[in-house]
Image: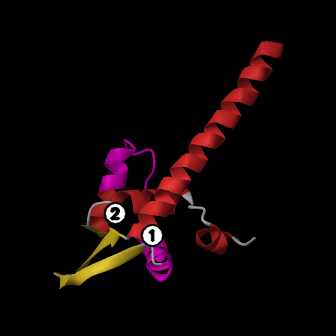
């Protein structure tokens, strides 16, 4: 399945995950990027082009919404209930993936 279909299948890319996570509280673009950098200690950064492309997809899918009018040409976004549900499902899915990986790697270490 094409990468563009990930929202339709209920999966979030890392970029979508961090943007949606940042929008648990209302933020505009620059604050989204800064929040992600601070949250990840600069280990994960998103450039403006990638961020705004992802925001368009999240808006279109109903995962986020724009709040009110633009202030100083800044658009402010926040996660919708649908977006928060998807975020929680992805957290659970990622936790399961980590548990699977740990189980396999521990098994591999035990056999060597």
Q: Element at badge 1?
A: helix
On the question of residue 2 being in view, the answer is yes
Q: Position of residue 30 (x, y in %)?
A: 28, 66
Looking at this view, is 24 or 56 the one in front? 24
Q: Where is residue 43 in the image (x, y as percent from the top left)?
A: 44, 44
Looking at this view, is 48 or 26 the one in front? 26
| Residue 12 magenta | no
Q: Residue furthest bottom?
A: 69
In the picture, the quarter occupied by the N terminus is: bottom right
Q: Where is residue 4 in the image (x, y as percent from the top left)?
A: 63, 74
Magenta residues, as a range?
Answer: 35-61
**Numbered label attached to residue 82:** 1
Relative horizontal placement of residue 53, taking residue 35 as reference (left or right): right
Relative horizontal placement of residue 100, taking residue 17 as reference (left or right): right
Q: Element at badge 2?
A: loop
On the question of residue 112 being in view, the answer is no
The color scheme shown is secondary structure
Earlier-in-chain disc, 1 versus 2: 2
Looking at this view, is 63 or 32 the one in front? 63
**Numbered label attached to residue 23:** 2
* 23 w.r.t. 4: above or below: above
Q: Which residue is at a point 65% across and 68% down the rendered structure image? A: 9
* 40 w.r.t. 64: above or below: above
Relative horizontal placement of residue 111, taking residue 77 as reference (left or right): right
Q: Which residue is at a point 57% across and 60% down the rendered structure image? A: 13
């Amino acid at each position: 399945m094409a990468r563009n279909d990930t929202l339709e299948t209920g999966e979030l890319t890392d970029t979508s995950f961090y943007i949606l996570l940042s929008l648990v509280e209302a933020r505009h673009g620059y604050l989204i990027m800064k929040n992600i950098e601070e949250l990840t200690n600069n280990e994960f950064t998103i450039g403006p082009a990638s961020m705004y492309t992802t925001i368009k997809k999240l808006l279109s899918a109903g995962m986020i919404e724009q709040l009110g009018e633009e202030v100083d040409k800044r658009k402010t976004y926040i996660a919708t209930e649908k977006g928060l549900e998807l975020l929680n499902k992805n957290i659970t899915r990622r936790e399961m993936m980590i548990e699977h990986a740990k189980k396999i790697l521990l098994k591999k270490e035990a056999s060597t």
